[in-house]
Amino acid sequence: MNQEEFTITTEGGGGTSVNFVLKGPVSTMTAKVLQKKLDDALEYGKNQIVVNMAMVNFLSSTGIRVLLSTYKNAIKNGGTFHIDNPSENVINVLGMTALDEMMLNR
């Protein structure tokens, strides 16, 4: 089975802001890596988080949990969390879970 690579790139990050660009599937396995990156950002005072998901072709339920947990923690710490430029798959999954209005940067 050919497994597609998952990558996370960090852009910007001045002050309390940080932008993450994701590429590939956010599966049960890769969501753990994403959780660590997002938790680290919050731990280091980055509470204005934007996640670009234009190149995400799959979003698992574990990935949704990671995004929701980070959203809640960012808000709790006086910050914001948005998904920017979501792929069609991400829009569909978040729409089915009614999280699209809360998380998508429109």
Image (cartoon, rainbow, N blue to C red):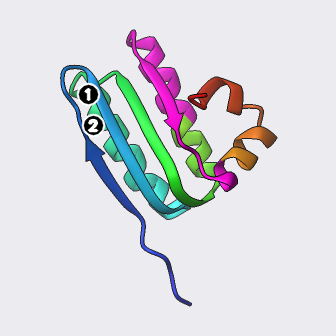
- The residue sitting at 26% across, 28% down in the picture is 43
**On the rendered structure, is 93 left or right of 31?**
right
> How far from the left and from the top, in percent, is residue 106?
61, 28
For residue 97, above or below residue 6? above
For residue 10, above or below residue 25? above
- The residue sitting at 34% across, 45% down in the picture is 36
Q: Which residues are magenta?
A: 68-90
For residue 16, above or below residue 31? above
**On the rendered structure, is 103 left or right of 71?**
right
Task: Report which quarter residue 27 is drawn in.
Answer: bottom right
Point out the residue furthest to the bottom here.
1
- Residue 73: say if magenta: yes
- Residue 100: say if magenta: no
Q: Which mark is residue 85?
A: none
Task: Report which quarter residue 16 is drawn in.
Answer: top left
Quick one: SS at disc 2?
helix
Would you call the spot at circle 2 few (<14 residues within 10 Å), some (14-19), or many (20 or more)? few
Type of amino acid at the residue the image marks with label 1: Glu
Disc 2: which residue: 40
Quick one: SS at disc 1?
helix
Would you call the spot at circle 1 few (<14 residues within 10 Å), some (14-19), or many (20 or more)? few
Mark 2 and mark 1 residues within 8 Å of each other at the beta carbon: yes
Instruction: Give the number of marks.
Output: 2
Disc 1: which residue: 43
